Amino acid sequence: MPKLAVHSVAARVVECLFLELPSKSVLPLKQEFYGPHFSLFVQDLKSAPTLKTILETATTETQREAAMKFVKEILTKGMTKSFYGYTYFQELLAEYLDVADSGDIRMMASNVVDHSIHLLSTRSGAKAVASFASFATPKDRKRICKSLKGYTASSLLHKDAYLALLRLIQVTDDTVSINKSVLNEILTAPADEDQSSKSHPMLGLATSEYASKLFLMLLVEDDEARSKYFDPYERSVLEAEASVKENGKLIPTSKKDGSLRRKELCAHISESLEKLCTDHATELLTSLPGSRVLKEFYHATGSESVAHAVVAACEKGLAEDPDIFEDVVGHRTIKNIILSDEGRDNPVFSNAFFAAFSDRLSDVVQSNRGAFVVSALLRVPSVKTKVSKSLNRMKKQITSLSEGGGPTAGYEALVKALKS
């Protein structure tokens, strides 16, 4: 297998073996990638071996060094023949980077980063690019950007590639370079796109489960709040500490403060994001990924134009069937935007919302979900008294609804808020 895996023609056969055969059938074949010490007497394998598990089962330091050397030789031969597009090669590369020391990763990065775009087809390949971005020199990070030129939007929309791009943006100190070579690509529509389309070029990204995380990573300042938008695997990549040893000391590979980097990047896309949230408030309100971007943009900026656009969307949505306040995503988004006003000196959205719906709060609380929205209004000091006064004549009805059949959690929250 080690010889076949680095042969110009046989590598295609190896790729087909790993892609087409049942995983149980290829486990013994994969074991050969770690050297004869671990393949000659292999028993039935219950799970797929990795370089990390191999090193953990090795009985001596000599065996560990031999395994690392054996895998590195396969990777080196594969790199000289540009096998970056093969799945098995990407997986083996990611396994090696997972256990290699930072200095070794940095040295390998200089030979690989020009081929970054070819590695992004799988989760393992994307993880490898993220690892190179973490430990590479500033010059090599620019080479990664150059490799991805023209593919920013498509990479962000890809179920695996987006994570490598997020890590690259997160660790690169040269924000001017990131703005020019990466972010500028998502601010304008592609030249071949139908110019009659009125959609904002970032709408598809903001409503994508994967691409929207770029905006969330940049908009949310609080580390704990930001981490809630990422799953454990994403956090393991994005929150990993990256340092290299120089003169016996560990030196961070990124020297700029993370919060400063986010502010500089946000400043570059803020105007376009505001226009997106203003022009497409309805689409964002009812999209789970989009609603997060909308809420966090308003939370970060308190934008008046976005606040009034969302209120206008709510007024239009109230007349639809089902109305916006009954939408499973929409009502929660409106509630969260209101709650973000709770500690704000100038709660633009809450004031505008009450001004628009002061005479129609009874229509909003016709549904259990709408009651959640109104209960949130009672937590904003500037409108609490006015909202409570508007609901006085409905107290009996709201109490009755909270005790009736069907979902009642929203009515119960509203009754509790009125009492407080």
Image: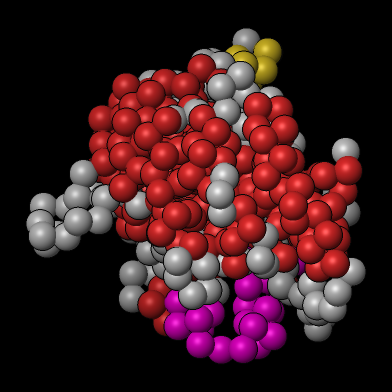
Which span of residues is magenta-colored? 15-38
Q: Nearer the viewer, residue 412 or 29?
A: 412
| Residue with the most extreme top position | 247
Q: Is residue 33 magenta?
A: yes
Query: Residue 267, how many percent across, how many down?
Result: 38, 24
Picture colour scheme: secondary structure
Q: Is residue 3 above or below residue 269?
A: below
Q: Nearer the viewer, residue 45 or 295?
A: 295
Our reading of the magenta stretch's main secondary structure is helix
Residue 336 higher or lower than 48, as above or below: above
Classify the position of the C terminus by image quarter.
Answer: top right
Q: Is residue 206 left or right of residue 27?
A: left
Q: Quadrant of the N terminus?
A: bottom right
Q: Quadrant of residue 331?
A: bottom right
* Residue 246 placement: quadrant: top right
Query: Where is residue 81 drawn, in percent x and y?
Result: 33, 58
Residue 150 rendering spot, x and y as whole percentages: 23, 48
* Residue 42 seen: no
Q: Quadrant of residue 369?
A: bottom right
**Residue 15 vs residue 232: left or right?**
left
Q: What percent of the width, then of the height, locates residue 78?
A: 42, 58
Q: Residue at x 41, y 59 (%)?
A: 316
Magenta span includes 71? no
Q: At 27% across and 50% down in the image, what residue appears?
A: 200
Q: Is residue 180 left or right of residue 206?
A: left
Give the residue at x 87% y 48%.
Answer: 416
Whether residue 280 is visible: yes
- Depth check, front residue: 151 or 208: 208
Q: Residue at x 38, y 64 (%)?
A: 85
